[in-house]
Every structure is written in C-alpha cells, then in structure tokens.
C-alpha cells in the first residue's frame, strides 16, 4: 500500500470523498503541518498550532493511481481560497498536499501547474505542496463522521 495526505477544508468531507474511491483501503482524519505535538481538535480550531485539518489515506496503486487521487483532490474543493473553504475560515482549512516522496511531489506540482494553466479557474491556485510530516489522529468522533451522524455533506465541490 502507498500513502497520501491532503488538506482541503473540513476533513469530514475530504474523508467522505476519498473513502468512496475504489483502491483507497484506509482513511483517517487528523492534523499535520504545524508545530504543536499531539494537538486536539480544540487546539487546532482555537489556538495557533499551525496544523491543517487533513486526511491521511492508504491506497493500492494497482487499483488507483496517485494522479487519480490528485484529480479528486482538485475537484472537491476550491484551491484558490487562501486559508478557508466556503464558510470555514482559518489556516487549519488551507489547501495543502503533503507528499511522501519525490514522485508524489513531482505529480502534485505537475497537476497544480496543469490546473492553473487549464483556464477554468478565475484566480491563482494557492494550494501548498509540502513534505509530509507527523500525522496526528483526530479524536474518534471525527473519524467517518458522516457515517456516524447521518450528515451528507459539508464540502464545496467544484465539479
């Protein structure tokens, strides 16, 4: 299995979108990209931890490619919004791709450039592309949140 990590706003909606993809074998929501060790949801929402809400996933590259995961990432949020997605405002909702190796970094940079050149966006893509650091698992009640609560969406979908 390979792994990937994305931040695209509220992690509940990100998880819901990716867990539906054939070949994604594991999902978990949490936090990454900041400086606080073992942050809680409250920490990330109400103090300056530097973390983003993220989805960590594992996938079978024989079934789904990293490029296909990137395609979904770009479609499930607005990558031109800086530190927000829709009504969710703050750096924890930033658009970010955390890469695990040079191949993922190159694929992410290539797909970002293609999206920017594609002409369908009216503003520049602000998505950050950074090396993956420590992933901190969010509290259990956040995992597979929509399944637990019966909610259906909290996400902006471009396509």
Image (cartoon, rainbow, N blue to C red):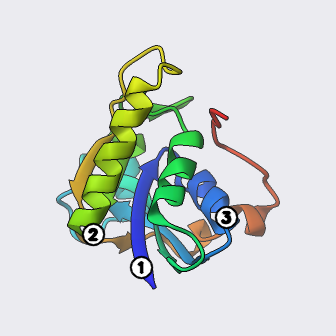
Secondary structure at badge 1 equals: strand
Residue 86 against residue 38 in the figure, above or below? above
Q: Residue at x 57, y 54 (%)?
A: 14
Please identify the residue farthest to the top as the structure is shown: 122
Residue 92 against residue 29 in the figure, above or below? above
Secondary structure at badge 2 equals: loop
Please identify the residue farthest to the right as the structure is shown: 150
| Residue 132 visible in the snapshot | no
Label 1 close to label 2 by CB (< 8 Å): yes
Rendered location of residue 18, percent (x, y): 61, 62
Rendered location of residue 143, percent (x, y): 59, 71
Residue 113 image label: none
Q: Residues within 10 Å of mark 3 (few under 14, many from 20)?
A: some
Residue indicated by mark 1: 2
Residue indicated by mark 2: 100
Q: Residues within 10 Å of mark 1 (few under 14, many from 20)?
A: few
Q: Residues within 10 Å of mark 2 (few under 14, many from 20)?
A: some
Please identify the residue farthest to the left as the structure is shown: 35
**Would residue 63 appear left or right of 9 to someone viewing this image?**
right
Secondary structure at badge 3 equals: helix
Q: Residue at x 32, y 44 (%)?
A: 110
Separation (CA) of disc 3 from disc 2: 26 Å
Q: Which mark is nearer the camera, 3 or 2? A: 2
Rendered location of residue 47, percent (x, y): 29, 47
Separation (CA) of disc 1 from disc 2: 9 Å
Q: Sequence order check: which comes first, mark 3 or mark 1?
A: 1
| Residue 22 visible in the snapshot | yes
Residue indicated by mark 3: 145
Q: Sequence order check: which comes first, mark 3 or mark 2?
A: 2
Q: Residue at x 60, y 56 (%)?
A: 12
Determine the image quadrant of residue 126: top left
**Would residue 38 appear left or right of 24 to someone viewing this image?**
left
């Amino acid at each position: 299995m390979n792994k990937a990590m994305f931040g695209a706003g509220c992690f509940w909606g990100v998880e819901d979108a990716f867990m539906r993809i054939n070949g994604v074998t594991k999902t978990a929501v949490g936090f990454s990209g900041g400086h606080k060790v073992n942050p809680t949801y409250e920490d990330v929402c109400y103090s300056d931890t530097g973390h983003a809400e993220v989805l960590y996933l594992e996938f079978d590259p024989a079934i789904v490619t990293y490029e296909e995961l990137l395609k979904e990432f770009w479609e499930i949020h607005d990558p031109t919004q800086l530190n927000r997605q829709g009504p969710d405002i703050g750096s924890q909702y930033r658009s970010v791709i955390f890469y695990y190796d040079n191949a993922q970094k190159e694929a992410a940079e290539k797909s970002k450039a293609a999206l920017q050149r594609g002409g369908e966006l009216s503003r520049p893509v602000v998505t950050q592309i950074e090396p993956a650091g420590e992933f901190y698992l969010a509290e259990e009640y956040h995992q597979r949140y929509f399944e637990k609560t019966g909610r259906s969406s909290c996400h902006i979908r471009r396509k």
